[in-house]
Image: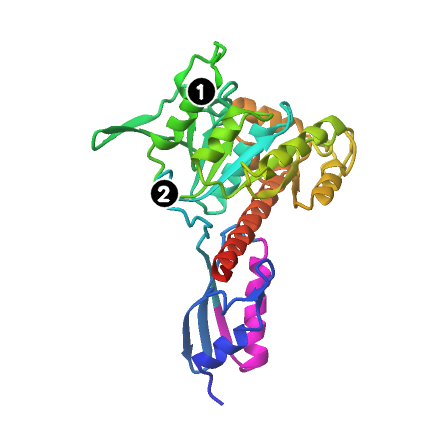
Amino acid sequence: MSITKEKVLEALKNVDDPDLKKDIVTLGMVKDVIVNEKNVSFTVVLTTPACPMKEMIHKACTNAIIHFVDKEAQVNVTMTADITSRRGDNRPVLPQVKNIVAIASGKGGVGKSTVASNLAVALALQGAKVGLVDADIYGPSMPMMFDVVNERPGLRKVGEQNLLIPVESYGVKLLSIGFFTDTSQAIVWRGPMASKALNQLFKDADWGELDYLLIDLPPGTGDIHLSLVQMAPLTGVIVVSTPQAVALADAQKGVSMFQMPQFNVPILGIVENMAYFTPAELPNNKYYIFGKDGAKNLAEKLQVPLLGEIPLVQSICEAGDVGRPAVLQEGTPQAKAFKDLASSVAQQIAIKNAEKETQQIVA
C-alpha cells in the first residue's frame, strides 16, 4: 500500500507532547508533510528551541511512521521552534515581546542577578531572542556582569519620541539604571522615583522583537514589584533562593506576594542557588554545606516546580566579576546547570502559555 499524507498525519497522532499532554497533530506542531514513494519528510515546530524533549519527540515521530505506516519508510524529521506567548492583551507596553519573566528573591545575597544573567545567556545560546532589564534600581549589577560598564545605550528618534537602544552583549539586549549613574555613588531614591526610572526602561526603549524579556528585580517586596505588575503583562515569575532556612522563609514570602490577588502572577518555579559545593578537582562530587533539598521541599510544599539547582563554584563568582557569565564555560558542571535551567524555564513557560490558551478556548 502506498504512503499518503493522511496516513502520516494519522500516525503522528500517536506522538504526544509530554508537557502539553496532547498529540502533536492536534497541537498544530506538524508542518510541511511531503511524501515521495517511501520517502517521508515533515517539520515538527516545537514551542521553544530549548525543549528538553526534542530528541525524544524526534525519535517518537520516526517510530510512529515506521510502525503505523510502512516499516520500509525513510523518515526525515526537521525539528524547529516557534516560541509561544500567552499575551492576549492589547497593552501598548512591549507589544513585540512574547514572554516577560520576572526574577525575584525574598532576600538579598542569594545570587538572583547571577542566575538572571546566566539564564539570559543560556536562552540566547539555545536560539532565543532575549532581553534583560536590570530593575534592581538600588544595586544594578548587570553592566559589570556583562562587561559593558563603560558602554551607554544609544538613542533613536521615533516621531517625537527619543527611544533608548539597549546595549548588546553575549546575544542579550540589556538596559540597566547602572548605565546612567556613577558606579561609585549610592542611588538614594524614594519609591515613586525608582518606579519612574523602571517605567522608562520599558516604555522609552526600542526592544524590538523578543522571545523572552527577563527582569532582574530588587530583593524583597516593595514598590518596584507592584509597579512592574501594574505596568507589564508578566508571563510568570522565577523565585531564587539558597538552601538555608532563613532564605527559604523569605522565598516563600516572595511566592506568596506574587500569588496575592493584586499581583496574581503565575509562579514558574523556584531555583536553588549555591545548592551544593563542587570542587574543581572533583567535578562529580557534591557537598551540601548549606543543607540539602531545602528548595525542593519548599517547591513541593507550594506545589510549584523546582526549576534547577545551581552549584556553589568559585568560578561562577569570578565569571560575574570579569563580565563573562559562567554558562559560557563549556563542559563545566555550572554551564550544564545553567543550560538545564534554561530548558526547564522554557518548558514551564510553554506549559503556562498552553494552559492560558486552553482557558481562553473554554471561556
Q: Is residue 65 above or below residue 324?
A: below
Residue 190 in the image: state x and y as whole percent: 48, 15
Q: Rounded to the nearest whole Å, what is the CA distance between mark 1 and mark 2?
A: 25 Å
Residue 193 in the image: state x and y as whole percent: 43, 18
The quadrant holding residue 256 is top right
Q: Is residue 120 above or below residue 139?
A: below
Which range is magenta? 52-76
Mark 1 element type:
helix
Mark 2 element type:
loop
Q: Is residue 158 visible?
A: yes
**N-terminal-most mark, 1 or 2:** 2
Mark 1 packing: few (<14 Cα in 10 Å), some, or many (20+)? few
Q: Amino acid at mark 1?
A: Pro
Residue extending farthest to the top is 185
- Please say whether residue 354 is one of the residues in the magenta stretch: no
Mark 2 packing: few (<14 Cα in 10 Å), some, or many (20+)? some
Name the mark nearer the viewer: 1 or 2: 1
Residue depicted at x 47% and y 29%: 227
The quadrant holding residue 262 is top right
Residue 292 in the image: state x and y as whole percent: 78, 36
- Please say whether residue 68 is one of the residues in the magenta stretch: yes
Residue extending farthest to the bottom is 1
Q: Amino acid at mark 2?
A: Pro
Magenta-highlighted stretch: main secondary structure?
Answer: helix
**Numbered disc total:** 2
Residue that carries the numbered disc 2 in the rendered image:
95
Residue that carries the numbered disc 1 in the rendered image:
192
Residue 107 in the image: state x and y as whole percent: 64, 25
The answer to whether mark 1 and mark 2 are in CB contact below 8 A is no
Q: Is residue 148 visible?
A: no
